[in-house]
Amino acid sequence: MVGASQTGRSGDIVDVEFKAIGAAALAAYPGLLRQWFPGGRVYGHEFKVGSLQGEKGESLSINITTGKWADFAANHQGGDPISLYAAMTGVKQGEAAVALAEILGGSLLPEPRQAEAREKAPKRQAWTPVHPVPESAGEPLRSHRDFGKHTTSWAYRDAEGRLLGHICRFDMPDGGKEVLPQSYCAGPDGKRAWRWMSFAKPRPLYGLEHLAASPRANVIIVEGEKCADRARQLFPQHVVVTWPSGGKAVRHADWAPLKGRKIVIWPDADEPGHSAALAIAKILTPWASGVRLLLPPAGRKDGWDAADAVDEGWTPESTLAWLKTAMVTPDEFEQAAREQQAPPPIDDQGGRRTVRIAGGRLADMATEAEQALLAASVEIYQRGMLLVRPVTEEVDASNNRRTKTAQLKSVDDTYLRFVLCQEITWEKYDARRARWVAADPPVDVAKTINARFGHWQFPAVAGVITTPTLRPDGTILSEPGYDPETRLILTAPPAMPSIPPNPDLEDADAALLLLKSLLTEFPFVDPESESVALSALITPVVRGAFTAAPMHAARAPTAGTGKSYLFDTASAIALGQVCPVMAAGRTEEETEKRLVAAAIAGRPIVSIDNVNGELGGDFLCQLIERPIVEPRVLGRSENQRLMNRATVFATGNNLRLVGDMTRRVLLCSLDARVERPEMRPFKENPVAAVMASRGRYVAAALTVIRAYIVAGRPERAPALASFEGWSDTVRSALIWLGCPDPVGSMRTARDEDPELQILSALLAAWSESLGTGVQNGHTAAEVIAKCGERNIIYEDAHSPTSQDWRYPDCVKPSFPSAR
């Protein structure tokens, strides 16, 4: 049983049996689809409509037999009726299953706690076909609840001519058709009735009575009952047979009655027909006295068969004359097919690879397609367990604004198929015209390429950037495209002024002065905060030079002081736009989900805006510190292994850093010292200044660091654990140019850590009550007893409204939320 706990409409928790509900809905699919989408149409086994909202068109395709569906216009897809109903109504899968069960009658919704007992209960015996059909069976069914009355039926009989069942064809109003088997069956309670069910396996051949009446005749095998009836006009001296349920059911048929016969197989003139014919030949070769296949004549339509030959006016004489030239052995037939399927060389004029579609070549087609995409330099990369592509997308910015950002988006099957259409010429064999013709790439090829993680040849990517950066060796990455050394993609870089190949201290001072000009109106509390701001301007630009960078956080006592504006300025340099932001979630888990999405997207800057109070979390610590992170993929029980090149920002009023965050964060403190700082006008507009000449400021950031590297990294700062590369590059360069050490701001963050304050208060209370040193050692029981004694004294001496005695100076700290 496949189930999940959901809340029903009555409010009770029920055990939803997805498998049972899906099977029941699939059985009723034709009627349900016509009810949901009155404007849809049926094409064979496919139901098509314009969209999930029932619009006109054929973008939404639903397989009535398997339940799979895909909305190609909206890029949505699923594998069963439950997922379709969920997408159609906008509810979750569990809610969709409950609703479908109620639509189907509600019997699939068990009472609470009955699911386990029902799972252990013995299964009821299913209906089973009865062969042969007894004379007392009565009239067979003439109509189907969804398809109406059948147009034609074919009776299957055994060698003695006794009825075994029927195959019925339904012609649909839209021109499609449905073919269903009908069997006489015995039910689990002994009841017998005609039902729309397949024959028992192995399934009988159509024409067994003719085979028994002519024990020495040769046998012609065709595909389909209609074709068999028509082919008998062309072979009066032969026995013509077929099998039920089409080309994919070859192995379910009973071929034993053909033992010792000479066999000629007339396949349909298409790839599925060829595959079915070869499968039959493989089965019959050990039993028959000879097996031959017929190569279809040139110039016939796709799917051409014996029935079409009759329509063309063939006679028994002309048919036998053609047989003498068309009969080949199975090996010859397969060789001819293989020669037709051999992929042609690359088109020297257009440079496009041609891939030919044929059965049994799925793995080869996927490999050829991937190689063609690599040869065409298509921008597809692997990131973790996903294929991704760089895109520019509009996202949220601070102060309810929108901005554009470059990021990585996963390559789904639909987009991959689109690229396969663009870059590769696809062909399939047209038997009617006896040549290869243009075709669309098979969906299975796109799915296979997307699924074979571990076998991809696409390059791995760490992120996407829109500004030149430094490589770890100090050279500048300025050419657009993929850089193998840093594994970064540089897209749409700004026009850059020339940078001296060996800048000196004077060049670095001038560059730093230009960057400082952007910060003149920000109300920094201390010089260290200005150094943190300068680091925020430089670090995202040169992020490719080191594997990890500390988070830059800006805080102020009141809103409107300029925290977000500071990082907008930094983002304008690094990204060419205001800073894309995300809000902190109400819980650590919610924040982690948002951070994971940003990490998978490969965003160069991840900014958490307007944090209210404390900031911490395990995954945030990893995103700041680790060059490779392994977040859990949302909705899956697996982790993604991702290279991490993000620079992390955060802003908040009275922001406090919790626990281990204090050693990972540079804290920039702002205070305008006015009641309404948002009303304070800026004389200059640093973001506009950057946008007007972005390349100039990018060059300044690069010049500062390049000059320090060329100088031999003098006055290198003490090592900073986990951030050695950043410390030896950005931090040390700022100190070299006379700026305060930005790492000094970490002391402030540590001193204000609420967890450290609580620990200090605990130790102070311990010292006051129990003393310290070896001479004041206590067992745990003694400590507990002492606490109880102190509580009794406190309750006697103070009113219930008094301050808690456990904290010094009558100050009760606020505890951080559980993480």
Image (tube, grey):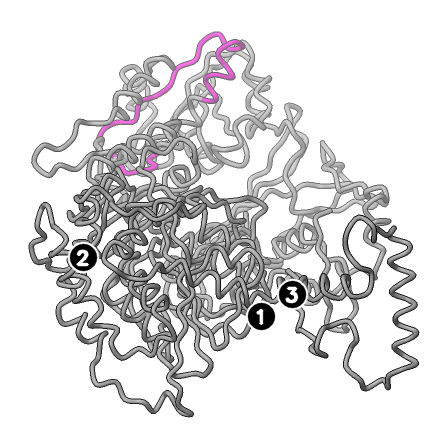
Q: Which residue is mark 3?
A: 95
Could you tell me which secondary element the residue under label 1 belongs to? loop
Q: What span is in magenta?
A: 279-304
Q: Position of residue 25 (x, y in %)?
A: 63, 57
Q: Position of residue 82 (x, y in %)?
A: 59, 58
Q: Mark 2 or mark 1, which is nearer to you?
A: 1
Report the Cα–Cα distance between label 2 and label 1.
Answer: 36 Å
> Quick check: 457 above or below 627?
above
Q: Mark 2 or 1 closer to N-term?
A: 2
Q: Residue at x 49, y 14 (%)?
A: 217
Q: Position of residue 225 (x, y in %)?
A: 49, 36
The amino acid on which the numbered mark 2 sits, given as a three-letter code, is: Ala
Q: Which residue is mark 2?
A: 492
Q: Nearer the viewer, residue 147 or 415?
A: 415
Q: Indicate whether residue 66 is drawn in magenta.
A: no
- Quadrant (top left/top right/bottom left/bottom right) for the C terminus: bottom right
